[in-house]
């Protein structure tokens, strides 16, 4: 049983140590020749135009949030669909409740006109 803890500790140690070693070696081995043109701000290789910060309509964020919610739904639905035969009726009812709650959220967002692009 203690062998399992050793394996986990080794993986945690490697997960912390390897990035630190890689970044430290990169810092030591790379050339450092800063000059003004190198330190200038750029956007995809072009000189920046206009303000650095602009205001976006809140509906963009709401639309992105809706995408994330339904993307997470697929993450939960896929394993359930694969193991459906083993889970039985209880898991089916739970998944119906889960999908129903998401459907209520979608109807609410639709009623609030979050999903309309024309008014942006």
Image (spheres, helix red, strand yellow):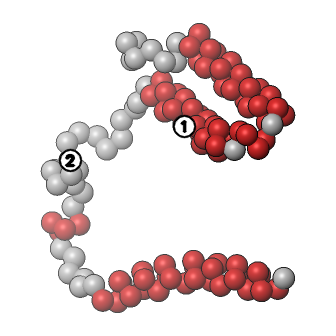
Of mark 1 and mark 2, the one earlier in the sequence is 2
Considering every residue shown, the one lying at the far top of the view is 111
Q: Position of residue 3 (x, y in %)?
A: 77, 86
**Contact, mark 1 vs mark 2 (Cβ under 8 Å):** no
Q: Which residue is mark 2?
A: 48
Specify whether 31 is left or right of 71.
left
> Residue 75 versus residue 63: which sits nearer the camera?
75
Quadrant hosting residue 71: top right
> Residue 13 versus residue 119: which sits nearer the camera?
13
> Residue 107 versus residue 89: which sits nearer the camera?
89
Does the rendering let one see residue 73?
yes
Foreground label between 1 and 2:
1
Q: Position of residue 75 (x, y in %)?
A: 60, 42
Q: Please say if 110 is above or below 1.
A: above
Q: Residues within 10 Å of mark 2 (few under 14, many from 20)?
A: few
- Assign a secondary structure to mark 1: helix
Quarter of the image for the C terminus: give it.
top left
Q: Please say if 115 is above or below 79.
A: above
**Residue for point 71% across, 22% down:** 100
Q: Position of residue 6 (x, y in %)?
A: 73, 86
Q: CA distance from mark 1 to mark 2?
A: 34 Å
Q: Position of residue 15 (x, y in %)?
A: 57, 77
**Residue for point 48% across, 24% down:** 59
- Assign a secondary structure to mark 2: loop
Q: Which residue is mark 1?
A: 71
**Residue for point 25% across, 83% down:** 32
Which circle marks residue 114 in the picture?
none
Quadrant hosting residue 40: bottom left
């Amino acid at each position: 049983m203690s062998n399992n803890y050793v394996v986990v500790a080794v993986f945690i140690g490697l997960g912390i140590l390897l990035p630190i070693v890689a970044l430290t070696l990169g810092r030591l081995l790379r050339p450092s020749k800063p000059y003004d043109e190198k330190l200038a701000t750029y956007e995809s290789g072009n000189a920046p135009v206009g303000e650095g910060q602009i205001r976006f309509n809140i509906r963009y964020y709401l639309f992105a949030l809706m995408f994330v919610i339904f993307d997470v739904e697929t993450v939960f639905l896929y394993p359930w669909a694969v193991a459906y035969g083993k889970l039985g009726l209880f898991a089916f009812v739970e998944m119906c409740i889960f999908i129903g709650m998401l459907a209520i959220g979608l109807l609410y967002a639709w009623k609030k006109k979050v999903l309309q692009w024309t008014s942006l």
